[in-house]
Image: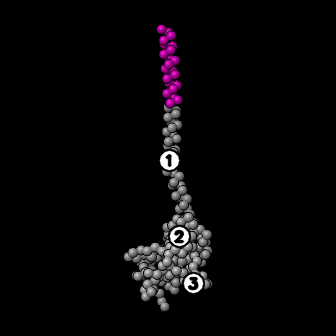
């Protein structure tokens, strides 16, 4: 009978040792699963914040100049002139969007390829088309504007094509004086 009791004790000790190993393995799997789940949310969030950091570098560096000679609405010719000035970000952007706000807002792209046919640059030093350089301004004409807009906004376009939000908006557009 002693033999059975001793064997029973050994069996219980082996069973107890196995349950500790199983519990440890399960705990490790739970921790690994939690890390994978958390990282699947954290990595995209961090990447998104880094991209916003690129926009942070260009914010307040692009603006519409409120000069009635260069930013105004011409009702007779149904066009608007917009003077855009950029700071030290010419190497960080490939262009910008101008949003003409009113009853129906319209967006116009001004970039190195000059893809929007309704936008033309008012010639400056013989140049037909160019973006402003660092700390420079250029005036653009946007045609087919049938009514005086309520606002003008400019949004920088980064080199990778992402469009940043803007703090720059002009809400008082004057009529052009001939």
Helix, strand or loop status at disc 2: strand
Which residue is pictured at 52% across the width and 37% down the height?
28
Is 166 situated above or below 25?
Answer: below
| Colouring used for the render | one colour
For this orientation, the residue located farthest to the top is 1
Category of crowding for the residue at label 2, using alpha-carbon neighbours closer than 10 angstroms: few (below 14), some (14–19), many (at least 20): many
> Which of pointers 3 and 2 lies earlier in the amino acid sequence?
3
Q: Position of residue 105 (x, y in %)?
A: 42, 74
Nearest the viewer among 74 and 115 is 115
Instruction: Please state the extent of the stretch shown in magenta in the rendering.
Output: 1-22
**Residue 143 among those drawn in magenta:** no
Within 10 Å of disc 3 (Cα), the crowding (few <14, some 14-19, many 20+) is few
Q: Residue at x 57, y 79 (%)?
A: 129
Nearer to us of marks 1 and 3 is 3
Residue at (50, 24) in percent of width and height = 16
Q: Which residue is mark 2?
A: 156
Residue at the extreme left of the image, as rendered: 103
Q: Which percent across, then down, holds residue 163?
A: 51, 67
Where residue 31 appears, x then y in whole percent? 51, 40
Q: Which residue carries the number 1 mark?
A: 38
Q: Does the magenta portion include 13?
A: yes
* Dominant secondary structure of the residues highlighted in magenta in the image: helix
Q: Is residue 163 above or below residue 48?
A: below
At 55% from the left edge and 62% from the top edge, which residue is drawn? 53
Whether residue 63 is visible, yes or no, is no
* As drawn, 24 above or below 134: above
Tell me whether circle 1 and circle 2 mark residues in contact (CB < 8 Å).
no
| Disc 1 crowd, CA 10 A, few/some/many (<14, 14-19, 20+) | few
Of the residues under marks 1 and 2, which one precedes in the sequence? 1
State the separation of the CA atoms marked 3 and 2.
Answer: 22 Å
Which numbered circle lies on residue 123? 3
């Amino acid at each position: 009978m002693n033999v059975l009791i001793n064997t029973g004790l050994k069996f219980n000790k082996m069973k107890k040792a196995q349950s500790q190993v199983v519990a440890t393995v399960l705990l490790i799997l739970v921790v690994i699963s939690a890390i994978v789940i958390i990282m699947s949310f954290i990595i995209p969030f961090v990447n998104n914040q880094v991209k916003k950091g690129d926009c942070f570098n260009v914010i307040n560096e692009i603006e519409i100049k409120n000069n009635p000679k260069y930013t105004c609405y011409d009702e007779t010719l149904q066009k608007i002139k917009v003077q855009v000035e950029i700071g030290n970000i010419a190497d960080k952007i490939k262009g910008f969007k101008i949003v003409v706000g009113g009853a129906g807002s319209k967006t116009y792209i001004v970039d190195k390829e000059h893809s929007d046919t309704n936008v033309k640059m008012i010639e400056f030093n013989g140049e037909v088309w160019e973006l402003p350089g660092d700390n420079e301004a250029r005036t653009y004409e946007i045609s087919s504007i049938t009514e005086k807009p309520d606002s003008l906004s400019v949004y920088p376009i980064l080199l990778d094509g992402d469009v940043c939000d803007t703090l720059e908006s002009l809400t008082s557009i004057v009529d052009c004086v001939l």
